[in-house]
């Protein structure tokens, strides 16, 4: 960033470059504090084919909003001293006790070992608990299963349970 360029101008320039390079169709960024608008940037298109510019009231489809809402709720509880980010998740969710990590094998002959430390609230918030979602039982894409053992201590597999029935 040049000495003369303000952060909002830099943001505008970088987002505009991304639009020009086709990395994103458009973006709207508004940062407010205490009712005062600090940054207001709008670049790109709401319809790239028709080259319709983004309007201030353009509507965006947002996905997976449960994560930020849950994260804010957790941070509010932490601010109030009702939980610590270092608390083991199993303190609040007993299902997180007795978690295991991948050691070797494939889907049909997987070998797992107990985790070296409990999964914490911070692990869950930072998506570093090791839990992933995949077609574990080849019947359901909505069951948690293992990831790789990249970090060793927290790549987790839920305790064994039966596969979902084919009837539902």
Image (cartoon, rainbow, N blue to C red):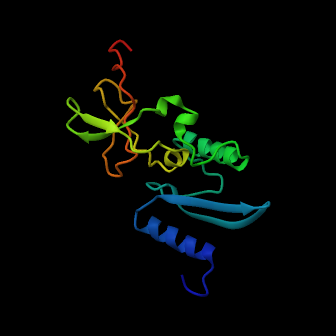
Q: On the picture, is 80 further left or further right than 56?
A: right
Q: Quadrant of the C terminus?
A: top left
Image quarter of the N terminus: bottom right
Tell me: 118 left or right of 139.
right
In the image, residue 29 above or below residue 61: below
Q: Give the residue displayed 52% in from the left and 42% down from the top.
A: 63
Find residue 82 and report its image quarter: top right
Q: Residue at x 30, y 26 (%)?
A: 137
Observer able to see residue 24: yes
User: Which residue appears farthest toward the bottom when viewing the image?
Assistant: 3
Q: Position of residue 50 (x, y in %)?
A: 47, 55
Q: Residue furthest top?
A: 167
Give the residue displayed 41% in from the left and 62% down from the top.
23
Q: Is residue 29 left or right of residue 51?
A: right
| Residue lying furthest right | 35
Q: Nearer the viewer, residue 168 or 77?
A: 77
x and y percent of residue 164 in the render?
A: 36, 19
Observer able to see residue 61: no
Q: Residue at x 54, y 59 (%)?
A: 27
* Residue 31 on image: x %, y %: 67, 62
């Amino acid at each position: 960033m040049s000495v003369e360029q303000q952060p909002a101008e830099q943001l505008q320039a970088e987002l505009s470059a991304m639009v020009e390079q086709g990395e994103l169709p458009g973006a709207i960024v508004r940062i407010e504090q205490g009712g005062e608008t600090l940054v207001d940037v709008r670049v790109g298109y709401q319809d790239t084919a028709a080259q319709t510019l983004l309007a201030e009231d353009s509507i965006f489809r947002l996905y997976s909003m449960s994560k930020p809402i849950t994260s804010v709720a957790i941070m509010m509880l932490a601010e109030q001293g009702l939980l610590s980010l270092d608390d083991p998740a199993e303190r609040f969710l007993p299902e997180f006790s007795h978690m295991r990590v991948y050691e070797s094998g494939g889907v049909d002959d997987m070998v797992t070992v107990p985790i070296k430390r409990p999964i914490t609230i911070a692990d869950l918030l930072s998506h570093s608990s090791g839990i992933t979602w995949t077609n574990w039982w080849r019947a359901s894409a909505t069951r948690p299963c293992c990831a790789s053992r990249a970090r060793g201590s927290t790549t987790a597999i839920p305790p064994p349970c039966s596969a979902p029935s084919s009837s539902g």
